[in-house]
Amino acid sequence: MCGIVAGAFQDNVIPFLLYGLKQEEYRGYDACGIGFLEKKEIQIVKKIGRINSLVEKVQNLKGNIGIAHTRWATHGKNTENNAHPHMSMHRIFALVHNGTIYNYKEIRTSLMQKGYVFYSQTDTECLANLLEYEYALSGNILEAMQQMQQRVKGTYALCILNKEEERIYFMKKSAPLIIGIGKQGISLSSDIRALEQQDFSVDLDEEEYGYITKENYFIYNQNQRVTKKEKPIQKNRFQKKEISMDCYMKKEIFEIPYILENILKKYENGFSAEIINLFSQASKIVFIASGTSYHAALIGSQYFSIPTEIYFSSEFITEERKIHSDVLYVFLSQSGETMDVLKALEFVLSHKGITLGIANVENSTLLRKTQYSLQMHAEAEVAVASTKAYCAEVLLLYLLAKYDKISFCKENILLIIREIKEHLKNVESIENIAEQLKEKEHAYFLAKGKDYFLIQEASLKIKEVTYLHSETLYAGELKHGPIALIDEGFPVFLLGNKENNEALLSAREEVEARGAVTYFMTYDAKQDLGFLPLMTDFFLLAFYLAQKKGCDVDKPRNLAKSVTVE
Ligand code: M6R
């Protein structure tokens, strides 16, 4: 989703901003823009579409103080006017924003009544004008920002240029923002990836605000200066180095066995006493997640011997929801920044629930906010379609469920990893299926019982990267309606156990009798985690089909790597 990078540098900051935007590209975006200071004027350049087109427009420009943004359209269409940075009406401020302003209409109306003119449909533009308005009243930017903080309802990470000063102001609430410190100067970003060229980072906490200069940074909370620990920035974490591949999705699928081996090594001697206590004392575990992480929770929760419930994070908060002190609330998220997950977490925390966060991204908001946390150790996942993180999540939940007998399970896990490696060596049949699906518009995925959780993930992956419309069905439900769509050449995937799959076989007969092309995929359900090699096949299928259809595999349309809006 939206990405922010900003810098106050001794030299030209524009190459750094462009590098940062490129690093944030994986998050998904529709437009991008840069704003910088030039002789006490703010210059802005915006482009719809890819960063490369912005590069062409700004590569010969120079400025030491600048802000930049990738916009994933929410409020208003994908137009240059709606792209960031947004300028205040009298061109005193320009700002970039991640998050959502809930009361923007009310602020906009009241500013319009004061004579302000708006040029975009965004919620963000009201912040630029509100700041200008408050600044006109107090004559002090930090004070104006505090006023703004009180007036605005919503979430934000903001970087602000003021035409008069060689500074970048910032504010943060429920959206990530990090300060970077390096020899070239001081920077800000919503994503640590953009700060890789810097040496140290400082995480900003809720409702903090302040400014950076070329030499220093100043953080405040409720008018008090705050000092924080600087952490060294790890370099080259996100390069396609381990396995050289043409795109991240493929690389990440091929990394699955190594990731699983790593996770096993990390946790083969068990979990900390603190984590074990959590699971051994809970009367029930409630899993909360979105998308692929939700699918991983559906399947991983099956291994626990105590009762479990699984919720979409976006559906968790209801008026009737009760939070219980003997229940463990487990939040599962690759990014640790999914807004729906964080909102559900806020809800549980506000009702004094016990929370455990499991995320892949170190230092993510989820891991910082839950009382207990575990890192997934799937290494950086860059492709929008989550593949290795799914496998990592499933394995981690399995290990947590078996925390007292991991040594007994180790052999089986290693066997599964070997099987995955074998599947990755034999991709030809998967490529052939992809070839057959190239011209298709729809597909069905059928399964029975718990295998339904697996086809949900397989179908999501196909949908996301290939845009093929796919639907999941319990095999027995087919004849109660959905079979009406089956005609000559309709692709139907059937997924099930190697044995006891009569119901699937008869579903196959029913659809084949009507001309469907069927793909019967089985796994050994007697082995714990025995479905993982098969899931790897589905990930590969999604990848090859996307590639054959000429889709942007790593950055599918309309999608974002971490969904940081509700
Ligand atoms: O970072 P998270 O695991 O919280 O993300 C949740 C979903 O947005 C994510 O899994 C999404 O469904 C992926 N694009 C799936 O490939």
Image (spheres, grey):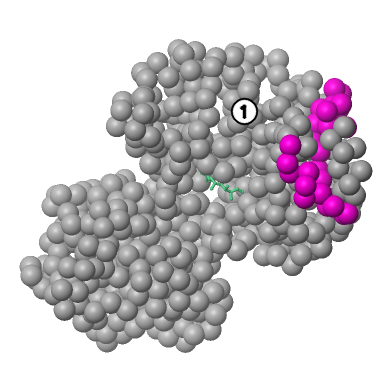
What number of labels is visible?
A: 1
Q: Which residues are magenta?
A: 480-505
List the residue tagged with mark 1.
300
Rendered location of residue 189, percent (x, y): 40, 60
Instruction: Please state the horizontal and vertical placement of residue 328, each as a whole percent of the image.
Output: 44, 22
Q: Amino acid at mark 1?
A: Gly
Please, what secondary structure does the residue beneath circle 1 have?
A: helix
**Label 1 near ligand 1 (CB < 8 Å):** no
Q: Nearer the viewer, residue 158 or 474?
A: 474
Residue furthest left as drawn = 138
For disc 1, the neighbor class at 10 Å (few under 14, some 14 to 19, many from 20) is many
Q: Nearer the viewer, residue 73 or 408?
A: 73
Tell whether position 463 is magenta: no
Tell me: residue 330, above or below residue 291. Answer: above
**Residue at image coords 47%, 72%:** 78
Rendering quarter of residue 156: bottom left
Relative side of 399 to 541, left or right: left
Measuring from the top left, give residue 229's x and y in whole percent: 31, 45
User: In the image, what residue occupies the spot 35% across and 75% down?
Assistant: 120
Q: Which is nearer the eye, 553 or 63?
A: 553
In the image, residue 502 lies in the stretch drawn in magenta = yes
Query: In this image, 443 relative to 127: left or right?
Result: right
Could you say which is closer to the camera, residue 320 or residue 420?
320
Quick check: 212 left or right of 72? left
What residue is drawn where x is 67% and y is 41%? 457
Please say whether residue 225 is visible from this viewpoint: no
Q: Position of residue 497 (x, y in %)?
A: 81, 27
Can you tell which quarter of the image residue 507 is in?
Answer: top right
